[in-house]
Amino acid sequence: MRISGLRPGTRRLAAAAALLFALWLPQQAAAQFGSPSLFNPPVPPAPIPSAPDSGAPAGPAISLAPPDGGVAAPDAAPQAPAPPAAAPTSPIAVGEMPLALSARFGSGSPAITGGLHWRIYANKPDANGVFELVKEDKSASPTLLLPAGEYVVHVAFGLAHAVKPVQMRTEPVHEIFEIPAGGLRVEGRVGYTSIPTSQISFDVFNGSQFEPTDRRPAAQSFLSGDVVLLPEGIYHIVSKYGDANAVMRSDIRVQAGKLTDITVNHRAAIITLKLVQAAGAEALANTAWSVMTPAGDVVKESIGAFPRYILAEGEYRAIARNEGKVYERGFQVNAGVDKEIEVLAR
């Protein structure tokens, strides 16, 4: 640094003052910003009114001036006010009490652990005469919350059910329903051979087949291996093998808490009919067929070259009509003996 225009002594004083100023300035900068370096360059402080950018939306403006009008010192970044603590909630609403429900097969019998359908109704009908459905559940042992009042509880277990009035007051209520019901599973066979599921179906009726009872089915068209839940009692099964006359009837008893397995043995066979010009020849198409009993009752009718019938054991006559001509032949059906019957067109 060169200083001109001054006397020698004055120049020496000015140079000394410049040197002192040069030494003093970095110390002041270091005191305010920290010692500068390549890894920590001096950064000027952010303006006081601005909050540090944290990436969050800016909050409301906050005054840093103290109430007495003095100078406020820089403070930490303002924090958003904490959300109010949530009020504790109770799992049971005011005025509601728990109703615990369970069912068993009868007094002293085991509990029913599945297949239950619970419905809770108001005990009085509305203006339209309908009982309002209040709650519904399919658990084995549900616990339902209900306001104080009177209700009707209905539980279904397959085709069996039970109904009971329940009154809710100020104490929890536990109700046990007794449903004397059991399971029924049916299989069809011819001899020792199981009948395919697609070829057989079953209907179940209340009471014995020999008693004059209501003939509406308690369960209809269920298949082999299906489990039907029924109230304890006497029933009869109608087993239909195919769609002709292979029908069997059996009386059975269903016991509470037990699975009753029934095997129905059909005495029937599968018969295929053919109208041919000669033994072993090709079947004639567009043939109308009738299968009749010896008494003349029609068992089954169809049109085709190869009609296939499931017929009960016994004697029959096959009537074939083709191109205005009628041909017939008698044949015998033996249980479990499937065969092909040829009717000669001559």
Image (spheres, rainbow, N blue to C red):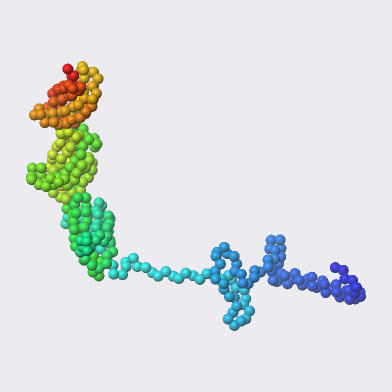
Quadrant for residue 57, please give it.
bottom right
**Residue at the outermost bottom position:** 68
> In which quadrant of the rendered image does the C terminus lie?
top left
Instruction: Judge whether residue 250 can be spotted in this image.
Output: yes
Q: Position of residue 104 (x, y in %)?
A: 20, 55
Q: Position of residue 212 (x, y in %)?
A: 8, 45
Closer-to-camera residue (74/67): 67
**Which residue is at a point 59% across and 69% down the rendered structure image?**
51
Quadrant for residue 129, please give it.
bottom left
Q: Is residue 298 above or below residue 5?
A: above
Q: Is residue 60 above or below residue 132?
A: below
Closer-to-camera residue (117/259): 117
**Residue at the outermost front position:** 324
Q: Position of residue 10 (x, y in %)?
A: 89, 76
> In which quadrant of the rendered image does the N terminus lie?
bottom right
Q: Is residue 117 left or right of residue 7?
A: left
Closer-to-camera residue (321/229): 321
Instruction: Judge whether residue 151 can be spotted in this image.
Output: no
Q: How many labels were placed on the picture?
A: 0
**Which residue is at a point 16% across and 21% down the rendered structure image?**
327
Q: Position of residue 218 (x, y in %)?
A: 17, 47
**Which residue is at a point 85% across and 74% down the rendered structure image?**
14
